[in-house]
Structure formats: C-alpha cells, structure tokens
Image (cartoon, rainbow, N blue to C red):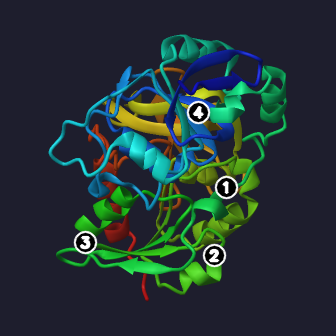
Amino acid sequence: MTQAVLVLEDGRVFRGQPFGAIGKNVGEIVFATGMTGYQETLTDPSYAGQIVVQTAPHIGNTGVNARDEESDKIWVSGYVVRDSSRIVSNFRAENSLPAELEKYSVVGIAGIDTRALTRHLRSAGTMRAGIFSGADANLPIADLLAEVNASVKMKGLSLSDTVTTPTQYTNAAEGNFVGRVAILDLGIKRSTIEHMNQRGLETVVLPAKSDAATILATNPDAVFYSNGPGDPEAAGGQIEVLREILSKRIPFFGICFGNQLLGRALGFDTYKLPFGHRGINQPVLDRKTGRVEVTAHNHGFAVKVDGGPEVDSPAGFGRVTVSHISLNDDCVEGLECLDIPAFSVQYHPEAAAGPHDSSYLFDRLVDLIKNNKVAH
C-alpha cells in the first residue's frame, strides 16, 4: 500500500496512509477542535497556507455538498485525520471527502495518532510541516525535513491577495432595506454575507487592496473587515485605509483578521499565539453582559492591550474597551470603541457549522448603522 508521512519542522515524524491527493504539500500545521463542520473548515479562506489537524477522530461520514461550502474551493494546504470514514451516510452528500480533496489537489494523511500530534503541538507550538505521499514518501526523512524548513513562515506573511475577490460585487438586501455595508474581502465566508443580507443589509464586497476612496465611493452606511489568513502586521495598507474610515466616523465592524486590523489601526500591537484557537467550541466572556458564549475560532494572532478593560487608543481614536476575552487563555477576543462607532470580535459570529451564540453581533451592526446613519 502506498504510504504517507507527516514531517514536522522540529523533526517529529508520523507515518500513515494517503488521504486525498497523492503528492506533497507544506504549510503551517495547526489543530482544529470542532467535532463537526469539517467542510466549513476546509473551505474557510482563513486556513490558506495551513495544514489542518482534526482532533475529532472520525472524519468524512457526512461527505460534502455545495450548500455547506464557505467559498469556491478548499483552501487548506494539507489535511490530517485519524480515521477517514469508509462510507458516506448523509442524504445531503453530493461527493465524498477524499474525492473532494483530490479535486482540489489537497494532500492529506490518515491513520496517525492525532491525539499525540495535538499534544505535541500544544507543547512545542505551531510550526511548519509537510505531508508527503506516493513516491515522495519514500525519500530520506532528512531531505523531507529540509524541504519543510525551506518553506515560508506564517509570521510576516500577507495572504489577503491570495484569497480575496478579484472584482467588486454586490449582494442585495432581503426584506426591508436597512443600509449598505462595504466589505473589504480579506478571506470572507459566504455565511457572513448571508447573515447581513438577511438583516436588510446590502453588501458591496471589494478586493483586499481597495483604497479608502474606492470604499467610500460605494456610499456605505458601514464598513466591514472580514476574516482572513496571514500576519496582521503585514497588512499595513489595510490598516491605513481603516484609519481613514475611522477618522470619518463611519460605523465599522470587524471579525477575526478584521479584529486584529482594528487593533493595529487603533495603535495596539498584535502577537503570534503559541498554537492559536481553532474550532467551534471556544468559550468567550462578554464583559458587558457577563454571558459566556461558545464560539467558532480560527486565529493564530491576537491583539495586545495592556491595562484596561478601558484604555486610550494610542493612535488617538479615543477610549477603547476590551469587550470580550477568551476563557482559555485570557487573550483579547473583542474591542469596542467608546468615542467612535466601531467594534470587532476575534471569533466568527456567522459560525456556519455552529454554535449560534454570537449571531447577535450582526444585530449589533444593524443597531450601529441605525444610530449612526450616514448622509449620502
């Protein structure tokens, strides 16, 4: 039987069976703790450049279908599972997971101890890795390790241009029209747009390199920065655009990567987490209500805010409060500006695969628009 091998940057090696396409892929290896929603994970552009390890042991039994896709393709660089389902047993399935991985040339590996791998990553931290199958799996480990160590690191890497829309497009509001949201597509998921449209918001989605003039030319009632991959420190252009938006007091909402960019626009630093938060079971505390939300995450960077919970923006945008924190490691999970109409969260309120504790944040965006209506 053709074999597959997973080689980590620190020299750790796992051997298993090929899963998906045959060949090789390298990337940053991360683990996702969700027990369901693997298709939403695979098609989330935020995972571009990453090899995803599923901590749930049995993956693929529900197959895949077009309705659950969050984008037009699978974005992960590689996929690691313990047990690949031998059959598909769901009435909504249109294809099997292995066939879908082959379709998008995603090299995966199955049959390894993902629990041991996850514990190793929790101790050693996120690192680069490579999956090699077919003829590549028979090469000397030293050669494979050298290839892994020659690959790019996520820190300092900008990936927005890789995942963004090439052209501007518009999605109509459903029901009563509330307002227009200009979305900077840094790797947006379809569910995010659907949530806005369902609340009477027309969405104008723009490429990641759009300047402030292009965004303002859409006459937005609010501006939204989406989720996406890469290091926020490498997104200087989007940060400067956001500062111009904030200075005009146009309502702003950001999620995930958008939260990190709001933090940097406000003058705070960002930093790389040891192994990040990924999955659909991450507990977050809303400091305003005292409510704990179970949330969907995919981030390897976070905003650094010293002091608080209320602090002054180092960039001169007034008072800022840390609105949400992670109950796993106390990192910043949300920002709210008190003197300008802007807020953000680090997690994914659309949570296509669940949970739905945080969908109220889209209602908060609607309220922000209504209370700060922009004259056109």
* Mark nearer the viewer, 3 or 4: 3
Which label was assigned to residue 159? 1
Residue at x 78% of width, y 21% of height: 141
Query: In the picture provided, is 187 more to the left or to the right than 273?
Result: left
* Mark nearer the viewer, 3 or 2: 2
Residue wearing tag 4 = 308
User: How far across and how far down the image is residue 33, in percent?
Assistant: 43, 26
Q: Nearer the viewer, residue 288 or 357?
A: 357
Residue wearing tag 3 = 200
Q: What residue type is labelled 3?
A: Gly
152 over 274 or under it: above or below: below
Which label was assigned to residue 228? none
- The CA span between labels 3 and 2 is 24 Å
Residue at x 63% of width, y 75% of height: 210
Q: How packed is label 1: few (under 14 Cα within 10 Å), some, or many (20 or more)?
A: many
Are the residues tagged 2 and 1 within 8 Å (C-beta)? no
210 over 143 or under it: above or below: below
- The CA span between labels 4 and 1 is 32 Å
- Numbered disc 1: secondary structure: loop
- The CA span between labels 2 and 1 is 15 Å
Residue at x 46% of width, y 26% of height: 81
* Mark nearer the viewer, 1 or 3: 1
66 over 276 or under it: above or below: below
* Mark nearer the viewer, 4 or 2: 2
User: How far across and how far down the image is residue 39, in percent?
Assistant: 37, 44
Are the residues tagged 4 and 1 within 8 Å (C-beta)? no
Residue wearing tag 2 = 210
- Numbered disc 3: secondary structure: loop
- Numbered disc 4: secondary structure: loop
